[in-house]
Image (tube, grey):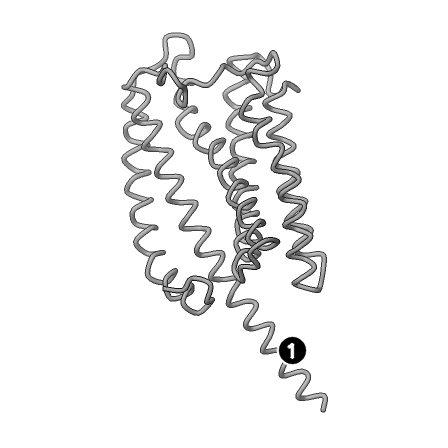
Amino acid sequence: MDLANPTRFVTLADRLVPWLAVLSAVVLAVGIWLAFAAPEDYQQGITVRIMYIHVPFAWLSMMCYSIMALSSLGTLVWRHPLADVSVKSAAPIGAVFTLLALATGSIWGKPMWGTWWVWDARLTSVFVLFLMYLGIIALTRALDDPGRSARAAAIVTLVGFVNIPIIKFSVEWWNTLHQPASVIRLDGPTIHPSMLWPLLICALGFTLLFFTLHLMAMRTEIWRRRVSSMRKIAAREAGR
């Protein structure tokens, strides 16, 4: 199937969205159940349960932006007709995930650090990511010319991608309150399997939810553009 064709993409999305929605709901339900069944941490106590949603939100905030960066290359280099649709549709979802990552991190940080917020490298770089999302959302809505809007958003997205490795490696490059990576490591995860598996299942569930929302948003954006185009054509014909 030629996914560069918006009509065929919408047809595929119509087929996939219901299945993805059900699958994400099931996986999330299992993951959350396992998270509540997992043992408490010997230091963090019950507060550790925030990890099962905070970490997936943080991962997805970066994954979503990475998808936007790849889509931006599609706009500028390959001229893919759906690339800018992907960027515009993913930005609000990424902003929400990033905001939730910041919020759940603050809720976890209060009992652990004694404060809701500190300007350490990890928190600051994630906050910058949130601002980048807001800027891209505003940019995609500020210009009337879809072509100019798509190119401008793609350029800003690619420039902002430099922040993703900063977020990832901030705990290694600077002295921060955040602990080093404990899941994705060359020598293997340091989290006990009783906590690791619920975390991974929750992450999978939220990832499926992201793709569900992304497909839905792209489908909606394609239809919005079609309606807008039809209205412009009707207005021109009425003005003759």
Residue shown at the point (51%, 13%) measured from the top left: 112
Instruction: Judge left or right: residue 210 versus residue 78.
Output: left
Residue shown at the point (55%, 17%) measured from the top left: 171
The residue lying furthest to the top in this view is: 42
Total marks drawn? 1
- In the image, residue 117 above or below residue 160: above
Along the line of sight, which residue is nearer the eye, 106 or 125? Answer: 125
Q: Position of residue 139 (x, y in %)?
A: 69, 51
Instruction: Judge left or right: residue 154 versus residue 30.
Output: right
Residue shown at the point (57%, 47%) measured from the top left: 91
Q: Position of residue 141 (x, y in %)?
A: 67, 56
The residue lying furthest to the front in this view is: 77
Q: Which quadrant: the C terminus? A: bottom right
The residue lying furthest to the bottom in this view is: 240
- In the image, residue 46 above or below residue 212: above
Q: Secondary structure at mark 1?
A: helix
Along the line of sight, which residue is nearer the eye, 219 or 118? Answer: 219
According to the picture, the residue beneath numbered tag 1 turns out to be 232
The image quarter in which residue 150 lies: bottom right
Q: Which quadrant: the N terminus? A: bottom left
For badge 1, the amino acid type reads Lys
Along the line of sight, which residue is nearer the eye, 238 or 88? Answer: 88
- The crowd level at tag 1 (other Cα within 10 Å; few <14, some 14-19, many 20+) is few
Q: Position of residue 113 (x, y in %)?
A: 55, 12
Instruction: Judge left or right: residue 8 versus residue 222.
Output: left
Along the line of sight, which residue is nearer the eye, 141 or 51? Answer: 141
Q: Position of residue 4 (x, y in %)?
A: 46, 63
Residue shown at the point (60%, 16%) measured from the top left: 173
